[in-house]
Image: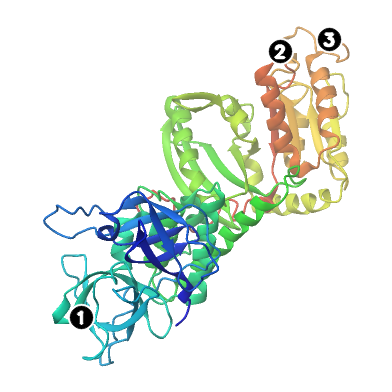
Amino acid sequence: MKSAEWHARIECAGTVAGAGFLVTPRTVLTCAHVVADGPAELTVTFTERPDVPPPQARVVAHGGWTAHASSDLGDLAVLELEDEVPIEPAALAPVDAADAAHGMPPRKLLVYGFPVGFDEGTLAECRITGPQLISREWIQLEAWQPDGHQLAKGFSGAAVTLADTGEVVGMVTAATGAARTGRMMPTEVMARHWPGLEGLVPAPGHRTADRARLRELVERAVRVGLACEPLRLYRAAMGPWDPEPPPEGFDSLRSAALFVLSELDQPDAAGTVARFTERLAGLLDDMVRAPAEPPAVPDWSPILVDLQHSGGGEDLVRVEVSAYSGGRRHPVDSGTVPRARLEEYVQDRVEAAFPYLTPGSDELLAFALPGDWLDLPVDRWALGSDDPTPLGCRYPLVVTAQSRRKASTRHLLTRVWNSLDALPGTRMHRVECGSTEAAGRLRVRLLRSDACLVGFAASPAAAHTRDRFTTSLTTPAPLVAWSRDGCADGERQTPCAGGDGCAGQRFLDELDTCVSGRLPAELPRRIWELRLEAEAEDGHWARGVQLLWDDPRVFADPHGGAAAPARSPVA
């Protein structure tokens, strides 16, 4: 018989009480009535592995069965071993695997129990009488042969397995003696009584190897305490025709794995199961690697907040929020809202976008703004109504201009960014208050292959800055930076000449020092670090920093796409 080592004998104070079976390296399942009358001292013996010392065990969960109840519902107990055992756990069969196909003979089932006189165990052959679920709890078993070994006391808690594969389809909960019949609690009912079994019970149609690998990964993740968001993991793996996750999400990784194995249509689910499995394996691999510095080039998974003027009035703003992961754009929501509610609306939709991001990737919050809104302090907006943390201090946050969303501009930007990958760091071209550089000369400068970051001493609205700022957007420059708290040139009677005492001059000096050793692709993270420093220090030069950063390669389907927003009536 396959995988016989996981069969277990349950002993209470040295007396054989029944059977059980190993489902994880430290977990054994049996019937609640098997351990109900025993003392605290429980021992589990794996009779096929005499080299493994019998570990002590304790009951950590049960299905609600009590000796004084009027029914036998919930007759399941979960035992936790004092240590893991070096035995491969039982493989659970797909739901309904024991049912015979129409017109086919019933499948032979095997039960390995410990009745009186068989302390080392014995086998009984049986089959299900029919697929009907009695009291939503049991399936009736009957002897395979009239003269075969019948189910009796000592078989309770034993795994019921498929004779040809050795996979578990249920657990014996009762035997009726002379009638040569018994009862089996199917694995899907066991999972209902103990959620820890979720993710181990596969759906029909999945290959045994696929199920076994996913089961092993789920158990490994639970064992090592993997920090994982099951909802994000499923969304990253789901295909275009897969069902949406439950409205309440998943309360555990096991729940998400069970959903993948049981709720997806066959055979289309094969790709989703594979993606889910591979992403989980990747997270585990990342966890066991030695701690290291963050990668030089982040794996950005952006959330794009697209703000536009509404044709309905000056007080209204058109908002569209999308998430980008796995080379796909996921529309989250869109609507037209009053300016007074804009910040609240964005807060809610940004939070709703996170489940779509690739688990383990680097989140990036990007605001696409009209030209006259590029100085909008979106990085200072609060994280939520109950959390005043600025968005720019929680996430790397950048802005870009609506005018740069055209296909032709995206094409040029992509070519520029491809050339930036070869640069050893970020090179900044300074536009200082006293600069006499004409806009046309700046355009020529930005067309050079090593053009990278344009830094402005004054805001885009300053009189002597406006033309050159527009040139940096349209050429286009891949990165532009300025400070909302820089030189207040627009408030002076005479233009600022720069030099000592100019706030914009200080901003450019400090910024140049901070970004010169960083790659262009890494600047959103560096600006985020500077915002954290500025939040903790009064008068910090970077408190009003604004970074226009726009790498089209991380924004698949940048502004077109046929997909409708997730909450749209036509989604």
Where is 417 relative to 282, above or below? above
Residue 147 visible? The answer is yes
Residue 38: quadrant of the picture = bottom left
Please give the name of the residue rendered at 58% of the width and 59% of the height, measured from the top-left corner.
279
Residue type at the position of mark 3: Gly
Q: In the rendering, at what x and y percent does residue 498 appear?
A: 85, 15
User: Is residue 418 or residue 475 the one in the foreground?
Assistant: 418
Q: Is residue 16 above or below residue 221?
A: below
The one nearer the camera, 146 or 340, is: 146
> In screen coordinates, is 534 left or right of 373?
right
- Kindly state the secondary structure of the residue where label 3 is placed: loop
How far apart marks 1 and 3 lie (CA) works out to 89 Å
Marks 3 and 2, Cα distance to the nearest angstrom? 15 Å
Q: What secondary structure is found at the residue carrying circle 1? A: loop
The answer to whether the residues at label 1 and label 2 have Cβ atoms under 8 Å apart is: no
Which amino acid lies under the numbered mark 2 shown in the image of this protein? Gly
Q: Nearer the viewer, residue 277 or 470?
A: 277
Residue 531's tag is: none
Can you tell which mark lies on residue 130?
1
Q: Is the C-beta separation of discs 1 and 3 under 8 Å? A: no
| Residue 251 point in image, percent of width and height | 40, 48
Q: Nearer the viewer, residue 307 or 233?
A: 233
The amino acid at mark 1 is Gly
Tag shown at residue 539: 2
Residue 190, given in percent of the width and then of the height, sits at 31, 62
- Specify the quadrant that holds the C terminus: bottom left
Q: Residue at x 36, y 51 (%)?
A: 59
Mark 2 crowd level (few <14, some 14–19, many ≥20, 10 Å Cα) = few
Is 84 on the left or on the right of 170, as rendered? right
Please name the residue that numbered disc 3 is placed on.
501
